[in-house]
Amino acid sequence: MGAQWKHKGRIEGGAKKGALFTRLSKEIIIACKSGDHHPDANARLRAALENARKNSMPKDTIERAMKKGRGELDEGVTYETVTYEGFCPHQVPIMVECVTENRNRTAQDIRTIFRKGQLGAVQWMYDRRGLIEATHPKGLDPEEAAIEAGAQDVSSSEDGVEFICDATDLDAVSRALQGMGWVVSTMELGWVPKNRVSLEGDALADVQAFLELLDDCDDVQRIYTALG
């Protein structure tokens, strides 16, 4: 999504597709545990399943993740969400959300990566928002759809259109868009930077290399950066 740095695993095959499926499975598990087990009554789970299908995740892998989330498979693994804050090289604020079954391992991995940056409080530089990514088969005007659905902002993204709304309105806006025929592929509570940082040349390359190091960490689920 526009407020979220895109994992390169979405476009590379082989091992990267396996890493993507792992992230998608974790999201389904967490979504199941955080609310109702039925997608019609759990907006986060509904979006997680739609995103998994969009990325051609096998049905048996999806069902296994659902069973884990419902507690039907006792594997002795408990996932938790941990958020890290700090700066990329060149003082670009960043929020990193991890899903892990081993907090100590994840903390060590993140600290190692942030030697090229700096850990520190940056949450005040972001707003918590509802983020919805959707497409419409007939190409309806997203500006009009945003107004009608109650979204506060809208922009184009590489995967469709991104609608931004108040965190408390996430499910209502998503349902309104779906009622207008929009196909929602991702909906989540995310972090939107209040200001963006523009870089060029070597400085931009430094930040992109740092983001790729984070992307290669198995426990990293989402990356929100103020890079413009």
Image: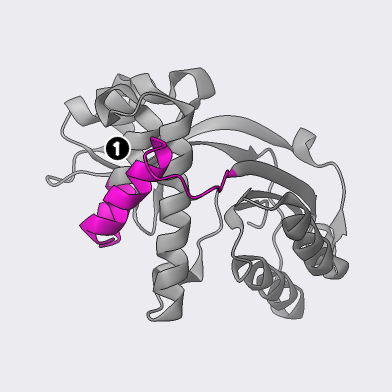
Residue extent of the magenta highlight: 50-79
Q: Quadrant of residue 112?
A: bottom right
Q: Is residue 18 or residue 198 the one in the foreground?
A: 18
Name the residue located 41 percent from the left edge and 78 percent from the top edge. Answer: 12
> Residue 70 magenta-drawn?
yes
Q: Quadrant of residue 55?
A: bottom left
Name the residue located 41 percent from the left edge and 67 percent from the top edge. Answer: 10
Is 101 on the left or on the right of 180, as rendered?
A: right
Label 1: how many residues lie within 10 Å, few (<14), some (14-19) or many (20+)?
A: many
* Relative image position of residue 106 (x, y in whole percent): 72, 57
- Residue 59 visible in image: yes
* Relative image position of residue 22 (x, y in whole percent): 45, 61
Q: Is residue 149 above or below residue 80?
A: above
What residue does disc 1 label? Answer: 142
Direction left: furthest residue? 138
> Residue 175 magenta-drawn?
no
Q: Is residue 226 above or below residue 45?
A: below
Quadrant, the C terminus:
bottom right
Is 182 on the left or on the right of 10, as rendered?
A: left
Q: Is residue 207 or residue 147 the one in the foreground?
A: 207
Name the residue located 41 percent from the left edge and 54 percent from the top edge. Answer: 24
Q: Is residue 5 above or below residue 13?
A: above
Q: Secondary structure at mark 1?
A: helix
Amino acid under disc 1: Pro
Is 4 on the left or on the right of 174, as rendered?
A: right
